[in-house]
Amino acid sequence: MARTPIVAGNWKMHLARGAARELLTTLRANLDGLQGVEVVVCPPSPWLGDAADLLRGSTLRVGAQNVYWESHGAFTGEVSAAMLAGTVDFAIIGHSERRHVFGETDEQTQRNLRAVIDLGMQPMLAVGELRAQREDGSTNDVLRRQLLAAFQDVDRLPEGFIVAYEPVWAIGTGLTATPEIAQATCADVRAILADRFDAATAEACRIQYGGSVNAENAAILAGQPDIDGLLVGGAALQAESFTAICKAAAGAAA
Ligand code: 13P
């Protein structure tokens, strides 16, 4: 089955409003109508409305970097999935910085995932092992635990469901996983999805690789059979590199 690759730029907590608007405008000029790949930008939450306005009518989509599962209430500082639903189509769920910097538990990830699915938005469910876990051979166990916990309450995955495999040791370090490691681990993720759901669901899922993706390594990573796109951090902050990455992913899929 043909899976449409998806490249998302996770801006994390970067770019002031003016720079964000400028980047969005340039990305639209560079990438609107690009065939063979879905392109999503995930700016910081105060700029999501600007992003939706500036990209409206284009093929570029907007995603949130995180959500909170409750729809409203006394949750100071949180932004609910429900509040984001009219503005964004996608949301990153369970990013490693949520898990490891902010202490998000598997249970919180599961609730956020559920809220996003229930609202008809597309989650990008991020999973990945720490360096010590890669080194002690427990990568597969960690990924299985993260995935099964997130899916605890989910009977069926929505069409085009996205898992982002991001080895924590590769995030922001310049230490990209080799194409062989990235491919093998994304194939393992697909096998876990087949176990949990069924083979057809696993085949239809899109699995992104993330972790020090740049304009040079994007094509070889995106060209691996079980990699269906990329989740990009640092290199998503410059129009030139993010444009090149999106075009490389479109080319790799062609
Ligand atoms: P870098 O591309 O900066 O390594 O970040 C990856 C990431 O965490 C994307 O979500």
Image: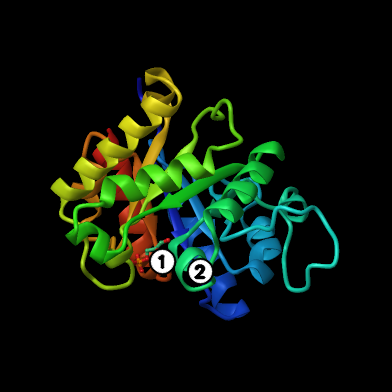
The image shows residue 144, relative to residue 49, as above or below, that is above
Q: How is the image coloured?
A: rainbow
Side of 155 relative to 174 (left or right): right
Name the residue located 56 percent from the left edge and 61 percent from the top edge: 65
What amino acid does circle 1 point to? Ala
The image shows residue 122, relative to residue 1, as above or below, that is below
Q: Is mark 1 within 8 Å of ligand 1?
A: no
Residue 242 point in image, percent of width and height: 37, 61
Side of 14 relative to 187 (left or right): right
The image shows residue 235, relative to residue 36, as above or below, that is below
Name the residue located 27 percent from the left edge and 51 percent from the top edge: 139
Name the image quarter holding residue 191.
top left
Mark identifier at residue 23: 2
Q: Quadrant of the N terminus?
A: top left
Mark identifier at residue 229: none
Name the residue located 68 percent from the left edge and 71 percent from the top edge: 46
What amino acid does circle 2 point to? Leu
**Element marked by disc 1:** helix
Side of 155 relative to 254 (left or right): right
Residue 21 point in image, percent of width and height: 59, 70
Residue 31 point in image, percent of width and height: 44, 51
Side of 41 relative to 5 (left or right): right
Which residue is identified by label 1?
Answer: 239
Q: Residues within 10 Å of mark 2 (few under 14, many from 20)?
A: some
Task: Return the residue nearer the eye: 47 or 244.
Answer: 47
Q: State how far apart marks 2 and 1 are (Cα).
A: 6 Å
Residue 78 point in image, percent of width and height: 72, 67
- Does residue 62 appear in the picture of this structure? no
**Element marked by disc 2:** helix
The image shows residue 14, relative to residue 200, as above or below, that is below
How many marks the image carries: the answer is 2
Mark 2 touching mark 1, by CB under 8 A? Answer: yes
